[in-house]
Image (cartoon, rainbow, N blue to C red):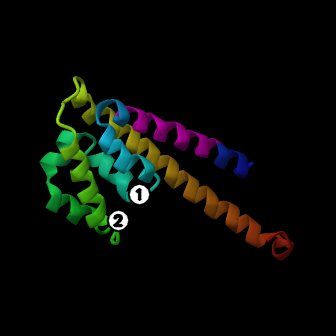
Amino acid sequence: MLVGFDQDLAAEATRTSNRIRGLLTQFHPSLERVLGPRLDHQAVTWLLERYGSPSALRKAGRRKLVEVIRPRAPRMAQRLIDDVFDALDEQTVVVPGTGTLDLVIPSLARSLGAVHEQRRATEAQINTLLEDHPLAKVLT
């Protein structure tokens, strides 16, 4: 039953990730190329929850973003934010409707973060059940 629940959560995570990537592709393709493949990382999800649009990222500034991301991604913080600002500089056209990303992307990122958290909790429960099984050594 837990494995089935985890599969449902995985499908939900994929759906939400694809929705975020689709929106970023429509409004800021270069930013999607940077953040899209990294949506499973907690730091990227957190970043999108707080700064969900290109304008919000730019307004926050490079130094502040590195500072707030570093505790969540110590090794990739500087590189990630440098990549984000390079992507922001690539696009010179503002697509109509980009402002709505401030509303939609943070909500989707929160949902994605919640699903990832549920998956981690489910994984822990599955591991506990497996360790308690008398044939755990044989099964693993």
Location of mark 1 (residue):
42
Q: Position of residue 30 (x, y in %)?
A: 31, 42
Q: Quadrant of residue 121?
A: bottom right
**First in residue order: circle 2 vs circle 1:** 1
Amino acid type, residue under disc 1 in the picture: Gln
Marks 2 and 1 close (CB-CB < 8 Å): yes
Q: Which residue is found at the position 21% from the left and 39% from the top? A: 91
Q: Is residue 88 left or right of residue 128?
A: left
Q: Which residue is found at the position 29% from the left and 64% from the top? A: 79
Q: In the image, is residue 11 part of the stretch drawn in magenta?
A: yes
Work out which residue is located at the far bottom of the displayed protein and give it: 137
Q: Position of residue 92 (x, y in %)?
A: 17, 36
Q: Which residues are magenta?
A: 8-23
| Along the viewing direction, whichever of 4 and 84 lies nearer the viewer | 84
Q: Position of residue 63 (x, y in %)?
A: 15, 62
Q: Which residue is found at the position 74% from the left and 72% from the top? A: 131
* Image: 106 above or below 81: above
Q: Position of residue 36 (x, y in %)?
A: 41, 46
3D distance between C-alphas at marks 2 and 1: 7 Å
Q: In the image, is residue 90 part of the stretch drawn in magenta?
A: no
Q: Quadrant of the C terminus?
A: bottom right
Amino acid type, residue under disc 2 in the picture: Arg
Under circle 1, the secondary element is helix
Main secondary-structure element of the magenta-colored stretch: helix
Location of mark 2 (residue):
72
